[in-house]
Image (cartoon, rainbow, N blue to C red):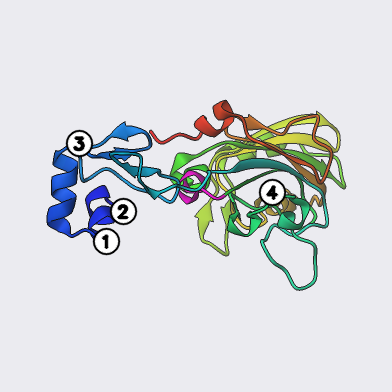
Amino acid sequence: MRLDRFLSNLPRFNRQDARRLLAGGSVRLDGQISRDGRSEVSVFSRVELDGGEVLQAGKAACYFMLHKPPGVVSATVHPEHRTVLDLLDEPDKHDLHLAGRLDLSTSGLLLITNDGQWSRRVTLPKSKQPKVYLVDTADPIDPICVEAFARGLYFQYEDLVTQPAVLDILAPRQARLTLYEGRYHQVKRMFGHFRNRVVGLHRLSMGAVRLDPLLAPGHYRALTATEVASFAAD
């Protein structure tokens, strides 16, 4: 919420008090004096008064990459299967959520955070963040798929044409696929259009963040500051 509203919502202050504190330079937001009541206060913000009195300590923002193994559900809770949060050893993991999902049988990069604004930037369709997958198929991949994927395929259920995708055939039954959207079972449906079944699917990257090759399946690590900033707002 706005800083002036945050202050006036406290039991000891009213709107006039909030304006007075801000005008007098008595309020620090994340370590900096703030006189602008329109400044945004999030759960991660630290708000202090002169003299060091802390009005809100601010939660620590957390950003992780997980190497999701097959058979683990991309969910926070599930009645039958182990979830990705079950793989994390973090004290406040109940506050975390997924920035994008992977199917039960799909492996690879999964981003997890407690920062809702950041995860929206990761997954917002208009951001068109590239997602790169390694795809293994039951039958040899027809070269005509390259041009067809680049043009887009018609999905009758949604009555739409998929965004142009880049397909690089690496071997007769293996390819690297770059998507700029995330439709339901999209990769499997695209190859299914050519009657070729996907038997293995592994996400290599999202945007500029690549799966750490040192991470074994089921393991995770914190994102670097550079990786977090790669999804910064425009």
Tell me which residue sits at (31%, 53%) in the image. 1
State if disc 1 and disc 2 touch (CB < 8 Å): yes
Per the image, label 1 sits on a secondary structure element best described as helix
Q: Of marks 2 and 4, which one's residue comes earlier in the chain?
A: 2
In the displayed structure, 77 sits above or below 48; it is below
Mark 2 and mark 4: Cα distance apart in space: 39 Å
The residue lying toward the viewer, choosing from 142 and 213, is 213
Q: Would you say the magenta stretch is mainly helix, strand or loop?
A: helix
Q: Earlier in the sequence, mark 1 or mark 4?
A: 1
> Mark 2 or mark 1: which comes first in sequence?
2
Residue corresponding to mark 4 = 187
The percent position of residue 125, horizontal first and vertical second, equals 48, 47
Tag 4 near tag 3, CB within 8 Å: no
Q: Name which of mark 3 and mark 2 comes first in the sequence.
A: 2
Residue type marked 3: Gly
Horizontal side of 36 relative to 107 (left or right) equals left
* Residue 143 appears in the figure: no
SS label for mark 2: loop
- Which callout, 2 or 4, points to the residue nearer the camera? 2
Quadrant where the C terminus is found in the figure: top left
The residue pinned by badge 1 equals: 9
User: Which corner quadrant of the image does residue 172 belong to?
Assistant: top right
Choose mark 3 or mark 2, whichever is in front.
3
